Image (cartoon, grey):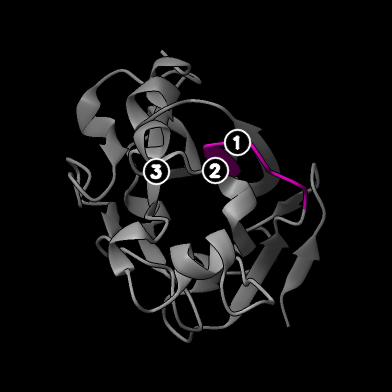
Amino acid sequence: MGINLQKGQRVDLTKGNAGLSKVQVGLGWDPAENKSSGGFLGGLFGGGNKGSNVDCDASVIMLKDDHVKSKEDVVFFGNLRSKDGSVQHSGDNLTGAGDGDDEVISINLQAIPAEFNRLVFVVNIYDAVNRKQHFGMIQNAYIRVFNANNHEELIRYNLSDDYSGKTTLVTGEIYRHGTEWKFAALGNGTTDANLSAVVASYQ
């Protein structure tokens, strides 16, 4: 059974998991439910106008010495594979509807070049400013890490804070600690308008 983390907690990922190399990071979210049949949220998330759904996008920012050095080191729906192939993205999910992970990042920890020390996992709302959307319109957001070979869940962090007004969530990170890898539950909401703005904060 996996470890459930609270915001700010850090936990060993590879230490104690002998031979663990290939992991997957699942990110999930659901549209906020409206108890009434109509109203703004009912129209926004109802089945009638799917074009209005909140489109969340998961991304990984690969850092060298805590900084992003190249646009090729950002893995997202527009760049599904890192240059070295150690990180791969499952592709874009436009609605977040349904159970389970909405987007999945596959990682081969042993194949990550030594100069990378951190992988930062970000979820942002596509075109949030123009659509006037924010994470107060999303519920049940989480990040989890599981063994890619047997799908055993190792770590889960439910992002339960109030993120109203926030357009980006820095959910968590996997980082080197000596010869091992650890995971940190971050859960930081920002008002960055797009992924480029988030990436710029790590330059």
Label 2 near label 1: C-beta < 8 Å?
Answer: yes
Q: Which residues are magenta?
A: 161-172
Which label belongs to residue 134?
2
Task: Please say whether residue 175 is visible from this viewpoint.
Answer: no
Q: Secondary structure at mark 3?
A: strand
Label 3 near label 2: C-beta < 8 Å?
Answer: no
Task: Please say whether residue 156 is visible from this viewpoint.
Answer: yes
Closer to the camera, 184 or 181? 184
Residue drawn at point x = 28 percent, y = 58 percent: 89
Q: Earlier in the sequence, mark 1 or mark 2?
A: 2
In space, the residues marked 2 and 3 are separated at their CA atoms by 20 Å
Pinpoint residue 185: horizontal percent, then vertical percent: 70, 47
In space, the residues marked 3 and 1 are separated at their CA atoms by 19 Å
Which label belongs to residue 166?
1
Q: Which residue is mark 3?
A: 60
Badge 3 amino acid: Val
Specify whether 71 is left or right of 125: left
Q: Secondary structure at mark 2?
A: loop
Figure check: 33 above or below 7: below
Q: Quadrant of residue 176?
A: top right
